[in-house]
Amino acid sequence: MGQYDIFVFGSNTEGKHFGGAAKAAVEQYGAIVGQARGLQNNSYAIPTIDFTGNEPIGLKEIEKEIDKLFQFA
């Protein structure tokens, strides 16, 4: 990974990055447990799961988060 690369991953609304790409984001790219969205060292979290009910977040909400990512980039 280059100096300015950012690993984008799906998060849950509680920022509990304990599995899959979220776990890799913590272990390899500095994601912060407890932070559900946004820049976290060399990673960027986009909430895709409502942790309280383990339900997917709607596409409109995910689209808003992706727009925020584009604005950041």
Image (cartoon, rainbow, N blue to C red):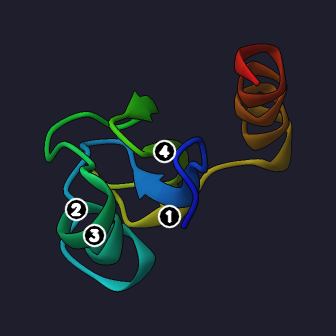
Q: Can you tell which of label 2 and label 1 is closer to the viewer?
A: 2
> Residue under circle 1?
55
Which element type, helix, strand or loop, lies under badge 2? helix
Mark-to-mark CA distance, 3 and 4: 14 Å
Q: Which amino acid type corresponds to the residue marked 4 in the rendered image?
A: Ala
Callout 2 environment at 10 Å: few (<14), some (14 to 19), or many (20+)? some
User: As shown in the figure, which amino acid type bears the numbered disc 2?
Assistant: Val
- Numbered disc 4: secondary structure: strand
Q: How far apart are marks 3 and 1 (CA)?
A: 26 Å
Q: At numbered mark 3, what does the secondary structure look like: helix, strand or loop?
A: helix
In the rendered view, would you say 18 is above or below 11?
below
Q: What residue is drawn where x is 62% and y is 50%?
A: 57
**Closer to viewer: mark 3 or mark 4:** 3
Image quadrant where one finds the C terminus: top right
Measured as percent of width and height from the top left, residue 41 is found at 33, 37
Q: Position of residue 48 (x, y in %)?
A: 57, 55
Q: Residue 45 carries which label?
A: 4
- Amino acid beneath label 1: Glu
Q: Mark 2 points at which residue?
A: 26
Question: Is label 3 in contact with label 4 (beta carbons under 8 Å)?
Answer: no
Query: Given contact means CB atoms under 8 Å apart, are the residues at marks 3 and 2 in contact?
Result: yes
